[in-house]
Image: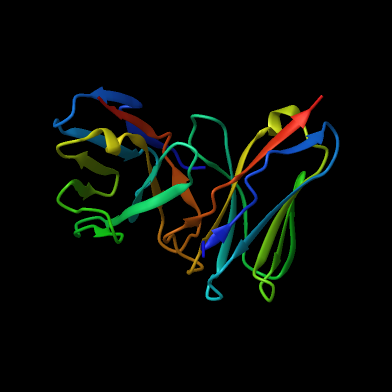
Amino acid sequence: QKEVEQNSGPLSVPEGAIASLNCTYSDRGSQSFFWYRQYSGKSPELIMFIYSNGDKEDGRFTAQLNKASQYVSLLIRDSQPSDSATYLCAVSLSAGTASKLTFGTGTRLQVTL
Amino acid sequence: GAVVSQHPSWVICKSGTSVKIECRSLDFQATTMFWYRQFPKQSLMLMATSNEGSKATYEQGVEKDKFLINHASLTLSTLTVTSAHPEDSSFYICTNGLAGADEQFFGPGTRLTVL
């Protein structure tokens, strides 16, 4: 069983729509949850992270965490073609200090004109 | 956010040679540095964790004698791939962290191709 699972996609959404990206994790001890965006051939860049159950909003992005269901999601509102990338979910067993991240394999998002 | 650089950004080498990759924190002192690698179409996998002045802690399945990590200062860590082989061809990424902070700052990555 993979530790962090994501649908590989591609997920195709029209420009201006909401993109919903999902991630499940296996370790109930996970404390911190991260979403990264990775363009082809580039290093990942952090979008946002979340610790607590519920929603966390940052601009067009909303992360949602449900620890009981071991599920974390990322919503992208008003999707733009520049949002087309692979989105990586990562989890950490620690909170409050930089520690090992376990990554999912990523979901490729395509925003169409 | 903090800036992390890696050098070189890409390297092509012959099988059997050694390659050194540098990771630098340009505007902060990183207490912990992590080295990841990413094979094509796969996700990032942690190779090792290093703290300044200490020996690196390697993940299971990563050969410490093949992937030498030196964390000589709070701003510099190096990864040396010794006797590289084609199966070592990958995208190597370092990340730096600060004590008391969750966020890790990613370097731009080094693409290694071993012929």
Q: Is residue A81 above or below residue B104?
A: above
Nearer the observer, A64 or B14: B14
Residue A42, position as x, y percentages in the image: 49, 32
Where is residue B57 shown, x and y percent of the image?
26, 61
Taking A69 as reference, is B75 left or right? left
- Where residue A45 sits, quadrant-wise, is top right
Occupied quadrant, residue B26: top left
Looking at the image, the residue that sits furthest to the front is: A1
Q: Where residue B29 appears, x then y in whole percent?
A: 34, 49
User: Looking at the image, what colour scheme do you see?
Assistant: rainbow
- Percent position of residue A29, x then y: 52, 75
User: Which residue occupies 14% across, 37% down?
Assistant: B83
Q: How many marks?
A: 0
Q: Is residue B40 above or below residue B73?
A: above
Going 66% across and 70% down the picture, which residue do you hit? A52
Q: Is residue A30 left or right of residue B54?
A: right
| Residue B69 visible in image | yes
Q: Nearer the viewer, residue B42 or B72?
A: B42
- Rendered-image quadrant of the C terminus of chain A: top right
Q: Residue, x 36% and y 36% (percent of image)?
A: B90
Camera sees residue B33: no
- In this rendering, position of residue A24 left or right of residue A45: right
Q: Is residue B20 above or below residue A56?
A: above
What residue is at 83 percent from the left and 43 percent from the top?
Answer: A18
Q: Quadrant of residue A71?
A: bottom right
